[in-house]
Image: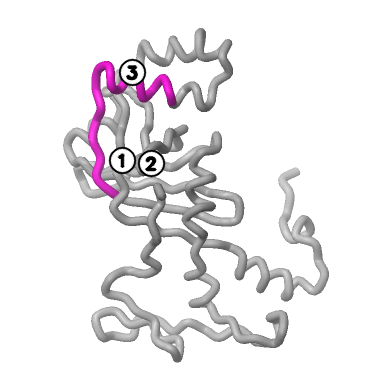
Amino acid sequence: MGVPSQESECRNIRVVDDGRVINHGRIIARAPRVASALIPGGGSLDAREIYRAQAAPDDIEAFLGTRANAVLGTLNSDGSIHLAFMIFLFEEGKMFFETSSTTVKARNIAARPQASFAVDGDGFMAMAQGTARLVHGEEAHAINGRLRAKYLTEAAAVTVGNAWGQIDDVAIEVTPTRWRSWSNAKFGQFSMEAAEGLHPREWWKQDS
């Protein structure tokens, strides 16, 4: 299994049965209860249950095999986070990203070998953080070739892919040490009940 089970909360934060959110013994928030009449079968559902619902590891791993985008986060020297949308390759529990050694993300990894990434899946979000390294030379060339083969047509791989290879001389490898996820199934259930028959396509304003 490439995606292990996930932690659902920070190590020092816990939620107790009455909805209080505790951090180092102090109450920092209260999770409100949601009216049970809105939930099918008359059950009880609160914000904690909605926002701590996790995606299945198998669903996450399957999605990571699709031609989606991920957001890669690396650490800047001032402590802020540099974010970039990237195509990616997930192999043997590791995430790979193609880039150039001249980029901010590559320089950040070289100086501070840690990273995080997030993907927006079909009905869930998944995030991971872990150690990172820059891959160079033939190893990077091989990884980047497999990554491009995932996304590009055979014709484009020969033209566009070869052009990318002239400027992208490294790959970023991220080894996740911690996974988190959120499934929107319970949130969707709650919202649909509250909508009183209004179809989801009628919920959102459209750009003109």
**Residue drawn 30% across and 18% down?**
169
Circle 3 residues within 10 Å: few <14, some 14–19, many ≥20: some
Q: Secondary structure at mark 1?
A: strand
Of marks 2 and 1, which one's residue comes earlier in the chain?
Answer: 2
- Residue farthest to the left, as pictured: 111
Q: Position of residue 177 (x, y in %)?
A: 28, 52
Element under label 2?
Answer: strand
Asked which quadrant contains residue 44, the reply is: bottom right
Using the image as rendered, state which of residue 146 and residue 204 is in the foreground.
Answer: 146
Rendered image quadrant of residue 15: bottom left
Q: Which residues are magenta?
A: 130-146
**Residue type highlighted by circle 3:** His
User: Residue 147 placed where, x, y %?
Assistant: 44, 26
Q: Residue at x 67, y 70 (%)?
A: 189
Q: Is residue 145 magenta?
A: yes
Element type at marker 3? helix
| Farthest bottom residue in view | 18
How are the residues colored?
A: one colour
**Dot label at residue 72:** 2
Alpha-carbon span between mark 2 and mark 3:
20 Å
Q: Position of residue 8 (x, y in %)?
A: 40, 68
Q: Position of residue 107 (x, y in %)?
A: 23, 31
**Vertical order, 167 against 37 (above or below):** above
Whether tag 2 and tag 1 are in contact, CB under 8 A, the answer is: yes
Instruction: Give the Cα distance between marks 2 and 1.
Output: 10 Å
- Quadrant of the image containing the C terminus: top right
Q: Is residue 129 above or below residue 67?
A: below
Q: Which residue is mark 3?
A: 141
